[in-house]
Image: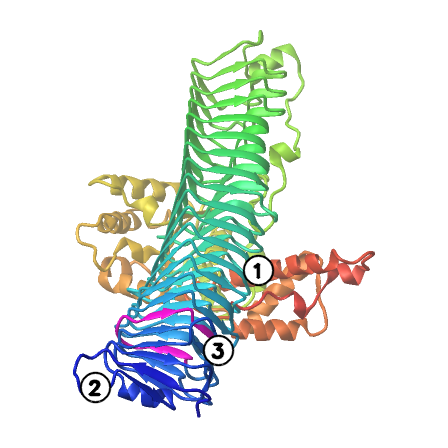
Amino acid sequence: MAQGTVQVTHTGTSRWRRRTGEYASLAAALEAASDGDVLTVTAGTYRENLVIQRAVTLRGPEGSPGSVRIAPSEGVPLTVRASALVQDLHIEGQDSSAPALLVEDGAPELTDIRVVTRSAAGIEVRGGARPTVRRCTVDNPGGIGIAVLDGGGGVYEECEIVAAGQSGVAVRGAAHPRLERCRVHHASGAGLSATGEHTGLEAIGCEVYEVKGTGVQITGRATAHLTDCDVHRTTSDGVTLDTDAVLTLADCRIHDIPENAIDLRSRSVLTLTRSTVRQFGRNGLSVWDPGTRVDANQCEIHDSTGDYPAVWVSDGATAVLESCRVHDVPDALFVLDRGSRADVVDSDLSQVRNTAVSVSDGATAQLDDCRIREAATGAWFRDHGSGGTLANCTVDTVQTGVIVTKGADPTLERCTVDAPTEAGFYVSAGGRGTFHGCRVTGSGGYGFHVIDGCRTTLRKCRTERCARGGFEFSEEGPVVEDCASDESGGLRTPSAAAQEAPAVQTATQTVGLLGSVPAQQTPQPAVPEQPSRASTEVLGELDALVGLDSVKREVRALTDMIEVGRRRQQAGLKAASVRRHLVFTGSPGTGKTTVARLYGEILASLGVLESGHLVEVSRVDLVGEHIGSTAIRTQEAFDRARGGVLFIDEAYALSPEDSGRDFGREAIDTLVKLMEDHREAVVVIVAGYTEEMQRFLSVNPGVASRFSRTITFSDYLPEELLRIVEQQADEHEYRLGTGTSEALLKYFTALPKGPAFGNGRTARQTFEAMVERHAGRVAQLGEPSTDDLTLLYPEDLPELV
């Protein structure tokens, strides 16, 4: 029942129509109105469910904003299905299953409307509706602020979401809204969310802050463009992209984020231009998974509040930084995992507490015309398969300029290291590297220090004013051509040094030379190779792995067959032929690489393989860009694996469904021939997702015939994830307090198991998050006890997103 009246001003020209009329209810007024009529509502509360189906104007009295309340007891208070003008209304919804304001058709204008509700959505736009929404406010602690669904769109200007029980603005189902100068805050879900193929979101001059979830979340092939926007003070990541999402950020500011400022996964693509990322607790840019890519141009990433690298690229992802600045961070750029790549051009990396550039686990980094200064280590190429190129780069005010260890093989051209306190270039533990036209000046230690007989190549390199000497080689191994030093001793080789003094040259391990970095992300410094272990010892390590019961049975059965066959041969009996090549199927993080490494060790201990070492490759390592190059790459990978295991991750990528003239087929044909010609020299393991590997084997019968069996790695159960956390806690001297195990079980049970689920990696990340939250809690205590310092409680668990 209305407490006021509605005056309808008719605009028709027919003589018999009344020019004005008053009605006791809004429903009656709307029934009498025609296109173009103006409905002026007097102050009051109207408990009606209104439906506007004509192009009318519905407004409250002038000078009394909010005096007209539309507040029915249930259902949708206001539904708009025409190009009407609605202004100066206060809408209250009481139905949690329905929106408070529903726009289903037309291009209406909604101006100065305040929605206060606990509904499924404050404002919902769907179908072909294209409203213009100006200066509207939504307060909906029970659901979504503004939902644009199922092909809806429209423009939203100077609107504000003051509270939302879920996402502030949610877009899905091929909808395409445009937000201009809007504010979204105090949402319990994402501030802005877009998901689904053909879904798009554009935001200009908007601000997202004080949200309990992610600031901006783009998933499931959705696309978004944000220009001149601020995202800050979230409780989760600032911006997340997942599953083929595409996002452009231009002139944006992401700051005061406790987790990752920007996180990309699962083939998502981000273009970042003239934007600033600062004050983040984990990574400024976190880029994961094959096909995921970020292109950053004229951006600044700085002032980390945590202990993590500013830019993190892993699992086959790609990052391109051009004309960017990264400064005041623990580590600037970490690139790790086979297939991961970072290209950095004309950029500055400065005031880095640990390592400016770290390349490990087979990753690649390309730096051109970059400047690194005020860091403990300029660049560190850590292990076998890791490499790339540094060209025309300068490194100054560091402890060590460039470190190459454990088989890494980068190329450095025309690079200068100025005033390092320890060494300009340091190569050890089987590191390689090619240095051409590089220079070291003013070193507090050596210019080039190469130990362990590393096969390093130096051409046209020069040193000046190095305190301990320009070139120091503790053993034969480096190839030196046309190099020069201003020191009187010239190039010091082991033989020359021995004639002067019998002293053995050594290197001191300091923070700058082989310093500490975040524990969960950093390979350890080089250690001497361990002698081969007995098969029982390696099988014991396999048994100690959490879960994988069926995998362990398969490996033991295969090992028993090989062992018995070997003993039969020793006894002069015929031994059954056992094909040792395997197919590993399963999701990421289920231990496939670890088991492959142990399998190689077992075969070496049984005398089946010479060394049992593991060489891990993927499509990017095998497939070239032109005819003939793929065969060469595949042959080189096979040769590196001689005497050990060639592990091909995501092998199905060699035979894509829409292959056309793809050179992956050439890699497969080359591999099949090599496996036949050198069947005793290398064990090949192909791995990948279960369905994709089944397709791969079905379309390549020549490959399928070479493998003895398929071993499936199942996803970890919640109980197994709990055991991994318990192992991590024990290893790092933590304990699980009362109720924590039960809380972890519930957490892992409720955790979404989508494409981004990392299995064992997720368990380890959960433990790391608990340690961080524990630290934040215990740091507030004056004199914490041993229990305070070691016990993890349910409150330390991260929130489910």
Q: Nearer the viewer, residue 9 or 567?
A: 9
Q: Are marks 1 and 3 in contact (CB under 8 Å)?
A: no
Upstream in sequence: badge 3 or badge 2: 2
Question: Magenta residues?
Answer: 99-118
Asked where in the image residue 502 lies, by quadrant, the reply is: top right
Distance from the alpha carbon under mark 1 to that under mark 3: 55 Å
Upstream in sequence: badge 2 or badge 1: 2
- Front tag of 1 and 3: 3
Q: Residue furthest front?
A: 15
Residue for badge 1:
764
Residue for badge 3:
67
Split into 4 quadrants, where in the image is the N terminus?
bottom left
Q: Residue at x 61, y 11 (%)?
A: 499
Which element is circle 3 on?
loop
Residue 667 is left or right of residue 779, and the answer is left
Q: Residue at x 24, y 82 (%)?
A: 34
